[in-house]
Image (spheres, rainbow, N blue to C red):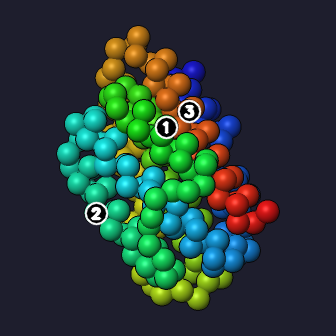
């Protein structure tokens, strides 16, 4: 099994497209109030992404990701809310996981891969749901439009992971699995707080 397969198998156990929250979104079954909560809470995590890229010394993508924080703010504004401090316990746990894993290059690579490799598919699904079922301002769409065809980040991460000494690989895989679980649990926390 090659390294990409190993990482992808860890992510597959927490495939975000299978999460009830994203499935309800793509079917137009989430009330707008729930999307507001998601925009507010998850935006706190989106704001951490540039740090991960800075840790692996990729200034170019760190700068791109900083611009994407503004795009997420536009998504929140289109829903008549603003990104704020996370209050839901599982989202707080995601932020803590990101802080820990983004502190070291090896674990940052694994954690970023868990997020970035899933982003194109989840962005496509969410964008399709927004367009088909929600009558919202167009400002809610650019973040997801941009990320729906953004495969180069996961490819860059795999290259960097491949260049690591083999003794680092176990930590990368563990970080990937840890971040995958934290992302899944954050969605569960939002779903349970708003939809239960």
> Taking 101 as reference, is 147 above or below it?
below
Mark earlier in primary sequence (2, 1): 2
Give x and y (percent) for residue 148: 47, 62
Disc 1 crowd rating (10 Å Cα; few below 14, some 14-19, many 20+) is: some
Q: Which quadrant, please, contains the N terminus?
A: top right
Are circles 1 and 3 on residues that touch, CB within 8 Å? yes
Residue 113 seen from this side: no
Q: Residue at x 62, y 32 (%)?
A: 9
Q: Position of residue 115 (x, y in %)?
A: 49, 46
What's the CA distance linking mark 1 and mark 3?
Answer: 8 Å
Q: Is residue 181 left or right of residue 4?
A: right
Q: Secondary structure at mark 1?
A: helix
Q: Between disc 2 and disc 3, whose residue precedes?
A: 2
Along the horizontal axis of the image, is 26 left or right of 46?
right
Q: What label does residue 178 carry, if any?
A: 3
Task: Write the residue at 70% across / 66% down.
Answer: 194
Q: Is residue 85 above or below residue 185?
A: below
Residue 70: image quadrant is: bottom left
What is the residue that sits farthest to the top in this orientation?
Answer: 167
Q: Residues within 10 Å of mark 2 (few under 14, many from 20)?
A: some
What element does badge 2 sit on?
Answer: helix
Residue corresponding to mark 2: 67
Give the answer, above or below, for where 192 lies relative to 53. Answer: below
What mark, if any, has residue 97 been given in the picture? Answer: 1
Q: Earlier in the sequence, mark 1 or mark 3?
A: 1
């Amino acid at each position: 099994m090659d390294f990409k397969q190993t990482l992808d198998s860890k992510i597959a156990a927490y495939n975000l497209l299978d999460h009830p929250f994203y499935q309800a979104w793509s079917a137009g079954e989430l009330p707008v109030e729930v999307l507001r909560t998601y925009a507010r809470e998850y935006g706190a995590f989106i704001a951490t992404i540039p740090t991960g890229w800075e840790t692996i010394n990729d200034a170019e993508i760190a700068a791109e990701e900083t611009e994407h924080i503004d795009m997420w703010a536009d998504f929140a504004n289109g829903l008549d809310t603003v990104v704020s401090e996370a209050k839901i316990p599982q989202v707080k746990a995601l932020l803590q996981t990101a802080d820990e894993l983004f502190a070291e290059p090896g674990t940052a690579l694994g954690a970023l891969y868990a997020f970035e490799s899933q982003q194109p598919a989840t962005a496509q699904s969410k964008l399709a749901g927004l367009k088909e079922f929600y009558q919202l301002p167009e400002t809610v769409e650019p973040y997801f439009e941009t990320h729906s065809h953004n495969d180069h980040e996961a490819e860059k991460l795999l290259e960097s992971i491949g260049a690591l000494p083999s003794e680092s690989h176990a930590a990368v895989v563990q970080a990937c699995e840890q971040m995958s679980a934290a992302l899944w649990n954050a969605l569960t926390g939002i779903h349970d707080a708003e939809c239960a």
